[in-house]
C-alpha cells in the first residue's frame, strides 16, 4: 500500500508496547488522530495517560521495527487497516476490544462481507476434516466468507473449502503477519493471501507465543456472524472461540458425532450449553436467517440524511470523535448531537467505538 | 390372579368395543363402579351415554371372549390392573387418556417405580444396540425401571440391559398380552414376564394392527419420567413416543451421532426441537435430578490389531464409511481394505451397516 502520514502514525502507535487500546481511545479523544498523538509533548500526553506511557509515546517506536513494518506495507497486497479506515471490519467495532490496527495480506473488500467462522481440533479425524471442507465450500458458495485460524486440521480444511467457493476465506493468525505458523500450512497461507486474506493484530515478527492464540480467537468470532465448531475435544481452543462468540452475541453452531469419539465431546458440550446442533450448511444458513438464497454483500447505498445529522457527519470527518468534540465543532447542544449520532448509526453511516467515540464508515 | 366380581366387571367392560374411556368415566361417575355399570338397565344407561352404547353395555361382552380372558387371568403371574386398583401406575393417571384396564404379566410392584423409557429404531446399528443396552443397564442399576416397546433393535437391547440391572424392565406391547410380536422376541418376552413385566391395554387375542402401535407409545412415555431415544431414523415410531413425552411433560433425551448416519437423524431432529443431548447414563440421571449412583457402561478392551487393519480403522474414524472412501483415504487397494474390514469386524472393532457402510465401535 501507499504509506502516508496517517498509516505511518498508526504503525508507530501499534509498535508501542505499553499503550493499551483503552489508553489509545483516551489519547485519540484528546488529540484527534494518531499523528496528533505522536506529535504531542510528554507533558500534554501525561494529562491523559500515566507519565511512563506518555514518555514511551513521546520516544516513539523502535526505528528499525518501524522501518521493517513500513517496508512490509509497501509490498503489493499488503495493508494496514486501522479504526479510522473505512475498510476496517465493522463487525469488530461491536466487540469488547477491537484491535486499533490490523495487518492484512489479501483482499480488503472481504473484511466487510458477511462471514462465518469454522473452527475445530488440530488433530481432527479425516471425516471431520472432510465435513469441515464440505460445509465451508457450501457456505462460501452461499456468499459467506469463511474465517478461521490457519491451524492444522479443521481450520486448514475450512480455509480450503472457503477458497473453493465464491465467498473465499480469511485467516486470522496469532503471529506477526510476516510469519507462517505452522510451517506445514505455508502453501495454504500463500493461497489465502492471493485469493482471500490473512490478518494479524500483532506486530511484524511476533513469534508463535501460546498466550496470543486464545486472544486472537476473539477476532475469529468477532469477524463472523457465527462460529461453527466441527470437531473438538474438551481441551480444544475452538471452545474458547465459541465462548467469545457467545459473549459477542454471535451464534454458536456445533456438529454432533458419536458419543464414543473424543473429537465430538467438545461439540456436545457446546450443544448442552445452548449451541445450535447443525447437520448441514443449510441448517446454518437458516439459523442465520439467510434461507437458501445466496448472501449478497450488504448494499451500501448511502442513507438519506439531512439537517443536524448531516452537520454532525461532516464534523466527524474520518477521525474518531466523541459527543463533546462534535458538539463544539457543530455548535449544537450535546443532546442534539446524541440524537443525530443514533440516526447516523441506524443509517449505517457511523459506528460506535469503545470509550464513547464514533467512527465514520463511508 | 384371583377373579372377583370387580375384576370380572372390568374385563367385561374392556371387551365392549363401543365404550370409549371418556364414556366410561361418565358411567362410573353415575353408577359408582364397573359392576354397577354392567348391572344398570339400558334406560338408566341411556341417561348418561348414547342409546346405542347403552344397548351394547346392557348386552354385555362376547361370552367366549370373556371366558378366554378370565382363563388367562387365572394363570399365575397374570393380572388385570384397573383405574381403581392401587397397583395401577400413578404416572398414567396424569396423561390425557389413561387406559381403564391394563393386562399385566409380571411384577406389579414395578408399575409404580421410577421409570425411564428407552426407545429407537428397529433396524438400528450394532453400535446403537450396544449403547442402548449399556445405558439401560446403568440406569436400571441406578434404580430406574426401563420401559420400552418390545420391538427389535433398540427396544430389545433396552429391555435386556434393564433386566440385567436392579431396576428391571417393563414392555408395553401393541397386541393382546397373550400374543408375542415380533416372534423373534419370544425368549425376551418370557424373560420380561418372569423378571420384569409385560403390559397391554388391548383385549386378549388382539393381533398386531399398525394403528395400535403409535397409540401404545403414549403409555411407554406416560409410564416414565422421561424418554431416551438412542438411534432413530426420521421415520421411526420413537419420534412419536418422544412427542407424547413432550405433551405429557416428560423429559426427552436423545443420543447424538454422525451427521452421515441415517440412524442419528431422528435424534438430531429431537435435539433441534429441544430434547436434551445426553452422552452418558450419568447425564440422564443428572437431568432427572437423581444422584450419582449410576454405573458407567463398562469399557471394552481395544483389540490388538496392526498393519493395514490399523490404517483402515484410523481412516474410518467415528462416522460410517464405505470401502471406496476408505480405499481413497488409506491409499490402499479396495481388496486390501476389504480384507482389513473383515479382520476388524471379527475383532469387534467395527460393524457392517446396511448399504455397504462400516461403523467403528470403539
Image (tube, coloured by chain):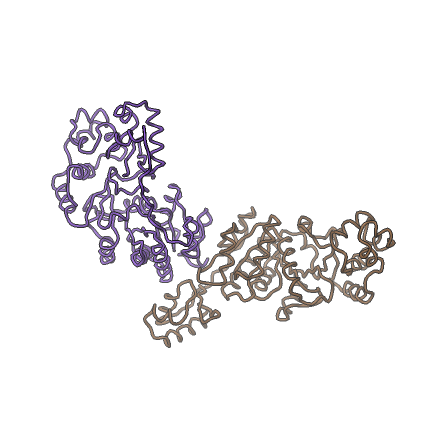
Chain colours: A purple, B brown
Judged left or right of residue A13, residue B253 is right
Q: Is A350 in front, or is B249? A: A350
Judged left or right of residue A23, residue B336 is right
Q: Position of residue B170 (x, y in %)?
A: 64, 59
The reply to whether residue B182 is visible in this rendering is yes
Q: Dividing the picture into quarters, in which one does residue A292 lie?
A: bottom left
Instruction: Residue at 49% x, 52% y: name it.
Output: B272
Q: Position of residue B72 (x, y in %)?
A: 76, 65
Q: Is A5 in front, or is A333? A: A333
On-image quarter of the C terminus of chain B: bottom left
Instruction: Residue at 74% x, 65% y: name it.
Output: B204
Q: Position of residue A193 (x, y in %)?
A: 23, 53
Q: Is B239 in front, or is B113? A: B239
Instruction: Residue at 37% x, 44% y: name it.
Output: A245
On-image quarter of the N terminus of chain B: bottom right
Q: Is residue B62 above or below residue A96?
A: below
Judged left or right of residue B100, residue A48 is left
Amino acid at each position: 500500500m501507499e504509506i502516508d502520514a496517517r498509516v505511518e502514525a498508526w504503525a508507530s502507535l501499534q509498535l508501542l508496547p505499553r499503550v493499551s487500546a483503552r489508553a489509545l481511545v483516551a489519547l485519540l479523544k484528546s488529540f484527534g488522530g494518531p499523528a496528533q498523538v505522536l506529535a504531542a509533548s510528554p507533558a500534554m500526553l501525561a494529562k491523559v495517560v500515566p507519565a511512563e506511557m506518555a514518555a514511551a509515546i513521546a520516544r516513539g517506536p523502535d526505528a528499525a521495527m518501524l522501518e521493517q513494518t513500513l517496508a512490509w506495507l509497501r509490498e503489493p497486497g499488503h495493508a494496514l487497516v486501522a479504526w479510522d479506515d473505512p475498510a476496517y471490519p465493522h463487525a469488530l467495532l461491536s466487540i469488547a476490544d477491537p484491535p486499533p490496527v490490523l495487518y492484512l495480506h489479501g483482499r480488503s473488500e472481504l473484511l466487510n462481507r458477511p462471514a462465518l467462522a469454522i473452527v475445530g481440533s488440530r488433530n481432527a479425524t479425516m471425516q471431520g476434516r472432510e465435513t469441515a471442507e464440505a460445509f465451508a465450500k457450501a457456505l462460501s458458495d452461499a456468499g459467506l466468507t469463511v474465517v478461521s485460524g490457519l491451524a492444522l486440521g479443521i481450520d486448514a480444511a475450512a480455509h480450503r473449502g472457503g477458497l473453493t467457493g465464491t465467498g473465499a476465506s480469511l485467516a486470522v493468525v496469532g503471529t506477526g503477519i510476516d510469519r507462517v505458523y505452522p510451517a506445514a500450512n505455508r502453501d495454504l497461507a500463500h493461497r489465502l493471501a492471493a485469493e482471500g486474506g490473512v490478518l494479524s493484530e500483532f506486530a511484524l515478527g511476533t513469534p508463535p507465543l501460546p498466550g496470543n492464540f486464545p486472544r486472537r480467537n476473539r477476532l475469529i468470532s468477532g469477524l463472523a456472524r457465527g462460529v461453527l465448531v466441527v470437531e473438538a475435544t474438551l481441551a480444544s481452543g475452538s471452545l474458547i472461540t465459541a465462548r467469545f462468540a457467545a459473549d459477542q452475541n454471535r451464534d454458536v453452531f456445533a456438529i454432533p458425532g458419536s458419543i464414543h469419539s473424543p473429537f465430538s465431546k467438545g461439540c456436545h458440550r457446546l450443544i448442552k450449553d445452548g449451541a445450535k446442533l447443525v447437520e448441514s450448511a443449510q441448517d446454518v444458513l437458516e439459523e442465520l436467517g439467510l434461507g437458501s438464497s445466496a448472501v449478497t454483500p450488504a448494499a451500501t447505498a448511502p442513507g438519506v440524511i439531512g439537517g443536524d445529522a448531516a452537520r454532525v457527519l461532516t464534523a466527524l470527518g474520518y477521525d474518531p470523535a466523541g459527543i463533546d468534540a462534535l458538539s463544539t465543532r457543530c455548535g449544537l447542544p450535546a443532546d442534539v448531537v446524541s440524537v443525530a449520532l443514533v440516526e447516523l448509526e441506524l443509517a449505517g453511516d457511523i459506528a460506535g467505538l469503545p470509550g464513547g467515540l464514533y467512527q465514520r464508515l463511508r
